[in-house]
């Protein structure tokens, strides 16, 4: 998945995003929107819960980088609260 922020209007001002990874380990990367060279890399193991909240989506983008070699199966469940206007 390419670089993006979950900053759509229907997610609200400071959305809470919960993401559960099951199966093969994967790399998850955050980069600062203003200073794109500032990055944080996280290895998500089987059963990992990634929690993004507060102003995270205002200042950071995130991605799951492509990998050259085949990976073992994995699934990701992402939970967002959608606001109805």
Image (tube, grey):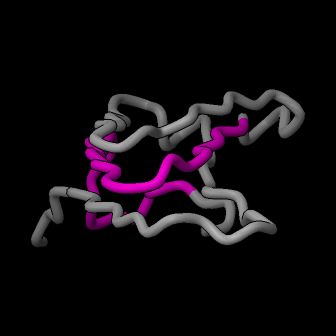
Residue at x 67%, y 71% (from the top left corner): 70
Residue 81, by quadrant, is bottom left
Residue 48's image quarter? Answer: top left
From which residue to which does the magenta span run? 5-31
Q: Residue at x 26, y 45 (%)?
A: 18
Q: Residue at x 67, y 60 (%)?
A: 3
Task: Estimate the x, y position of residue 35 in percent, counting from the top left.
Answer: 84, 32
Count up the numbered dots: 0
Which residue appears at 36% of the width and 37% of the height? 50
Residue 8: in magenta span: yes
The residue lying toward the viewer, choosing from 83 and 85, is: 83
Q: Which picture quadrant has residue 68?
A: bottom right
Please say if 75 is above or below 13. below
- 58, 17: nearer the viewer: 17
Q: Is residue 79 left or right of residue 2?
A: left
- Report whether 55 appears left or right of 9: right
Q: Residue 41 location in percent, x, y?
A: 67, 32
């Amino acid at each position: 998945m390419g670089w993006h922020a979950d900053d759509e209007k229907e997610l609200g001002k400071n959305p809470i995003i919960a993401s559960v990874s099951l199966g093969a380990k994967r790399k998850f990367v955050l980069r600062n929107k203003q200073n794109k060279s500032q990055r944080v890399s996280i290895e998500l193991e089987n059963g990992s819960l990634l929690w993004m909240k507060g102003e995270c989506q205002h200042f950071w983008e995130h991605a799951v980088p492509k990998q050259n070699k085949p990976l073992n199966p994995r699934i990701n469940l992402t939970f967002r609260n959608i606001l109805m206007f």
